[in-house]
Amino acid sequence: MCGICGLWRQDGEPLDAALLLNMNRRIAHRGPDGSGCIVFDSRNPARCYQFDECHPQGHAGLDHDGRYDVGLGHRRLSIIDLSTGDQPMSNEDGSVWIVYNGELYNYRELRQELQARGHCFHSTSDTEVIVHAYEEYGAECPKYFNGIFAFAIWDSRKANLFLARDHFGVKPLYYCLYENRFYFASELKAILADPSVPRELDLDALNLCLTLRYTPSPWTLIKGIQKLPPGCSLMVTPDGMQQQRFWRDPAPIDRDRTEDAWIETLRVSVEEAVVRQMVSDVPIGISLSSGVDSTTLLALMSKHAASPVHAFTVGFADRETSEIAPAREMAAKFGAQFYEQMITASDYTDFMTRYMWHLEEPIGNESAAAYYFVADMARQQGVKVLLNGQGADEAFAGYSRYLGVAHSDWLRLGALPPFRQLLPRFLAGTTLGEQYQRFVFSCRASSDDEQFLRVYSIWTDETRRELVRPSVLDQIDNDLPIRYVREQLAHAPAGTPLERMTYVDARTSLPDNLLLCEDKMAMAAGVEARVPFLDREVMRLAEQIPGKLKVRGRRDKYIHRKACAPWVGKAVTTRPQIGFDNAVQIWLQTQLGAHMRQVITSPDSFTSAYLNPDAVLHLMQEHAERRRDHQRILFLLLSLESWHQVFITDGGAK
């Protein structure tokens, strides 16, 4: 995996090569194996100049006559084609140049097709396949790709810049147009390498973040910097920007196929995806939990690997349950080499500032930092690629909210109406877990969009009014979250609420929450994360499966578990999911809570500027006394504090 960045001075001024180098340095952790930069004259296709991080003095030879106004930067993590895959890379005549982050799993098939059409290749890399696919198909090229990618192509003949992000947003891509200067990068901090880019908090984005516990594309918390949404491309010309979606809607749900037929087809598709994603010229491993998803991957990897698979698992101190023991058992069963680490409260607290520097976007996901420790273990063992089970829960309905939505119609549509109205009031003061509180809150919704928003939201309107300063509330568009949910549902295909929710989640919370965390944490350690369950062909199949085969009674991921059982055994498919079962809830009552109290009471804190500190302290007190479960809100607020310090107070400098 790699890191990319670039800028285009559309204001007629020459670019600063030192700035391009600094942007590239900001993402050096994404590509510790090499670097490269190139600049172009947008008005003269023949003029370009190439230099690299190892010889930065090379940029001193640039002709500073106002001609070089476009620059591309790249940091390389060598995975495929170790000897000839350096970037930036061009076509034969140097008219098309690319910087690319990702892996194409169907690049060999595409290479053969492009060779048959007359294209000549000088490397065995998937990067060159994208270059020639762009030459052949233009802006339509991403729809031919099966992989995880974010790339930028400079077409000197047409004087345009073409960017694209993969179907489900596994790889991030940020961009900004400020005063006729266009910036892009794998990470937001590279854009902030230019001190002239404003560091202003976007209050609408903050509203969405506080509601959903992540900031959805295209927003970021910094006004003017956007994320390219999953499955989209962006064409940048001197006349402006045009975004289009290349990922077409999935095929209609197939309600005629039998359960056995689905199981057989699904098994073939998943195994093929694992084999595709094992392609690498460096050692690969797996982030292993005790659940059905990663254990299935381990079983298939062990079946097709030439040597024992390296498996990595972390646990949290102060928790009664842990992934480590059952994961160790599964590793032994499949002959894997097993590595483990126990994360302590001190480890977590010490990592918080570095965590936000790498994550860049506050997220109410207490387990997010855990993946860094997994990836760092892998790096120490010389493993550069980790497969993991991300995406299976969205594809096959594996979260508790899906059980709630699948069985909520009898509450929402009129059955037992007095019970429906009284239940939320009866349970309002109980110590139910936060997820159950949200489910109860959603029961009184009168429409799909309202129900979905209530399921997603980690706070109520009442909590919002208590926590947020009135002066800030006056500047916030309070209807934005419901409009956002309605817009996502408008793109969802016809189906049951469960089928529509899984479709929406795979394109919203998955890329902008879970996958963002996974990518940033893995790349912080210089490791590539791959997600076989998000293989384009697996997802295309999964989204045709009826919801009744995903949730059956109280069983989630029903069809998925049935398909995986022959590989891993019934004991694994029926085992309760632990995940990265963290101890943050306990730590917020002790060491992490003390750290949070110190931070929020600081005069220059995020809380002091935008929230009611007394209301936040009240939430902390309720949580500490175990009267209410505020874990997700409190962790999100703590993350916002860290983010505000790093990117607003300190301006993103490092």
Image: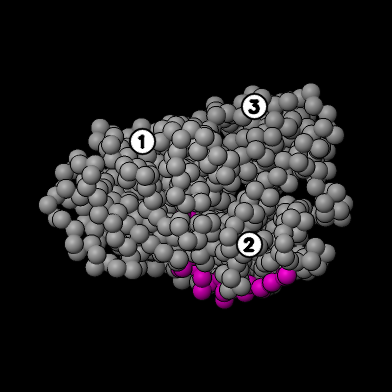
Q: State yes or no: discs 2 and 1 in contact (Cβ < 8 Å).
A: no
Q: Is residue 389 above or below residue 407?
A: below
First in sequence: mark 2 vs mark 1: 1
First in sequence: mark 3 vs mark 2: 3
Residue wearing tag 3: 251
CA gap, disc 3 and disc 2:
33 Å
What residue do we see at 16% from left, 44% from top? Answer: 12
Q: Is residue 119 magenta?
A: no
Q: Residue furthest bottom?
A: 346
Task: Look at label 2 and name its amino acid.
Answer: Ile
Q: Which residues are magenta?
A: 337-362
What residue do we see at 32% from left, 57% from top? Answer: 37
Residue wearing tag 2: 284
What numbered label is drawn on residue 235?
1
Q: Quadrant of the C terminus?
A: bottom left
Would residue 265 be found to the left or right of residue 566 on screen?
left
Helix, strand or loop for disc 1 = strand
Q: Report the label total.
A: 3
CA gap, disc 1 and disc 3:
27 Å
Q: Nearer the viewer, residue 630 or 379?
A: 379
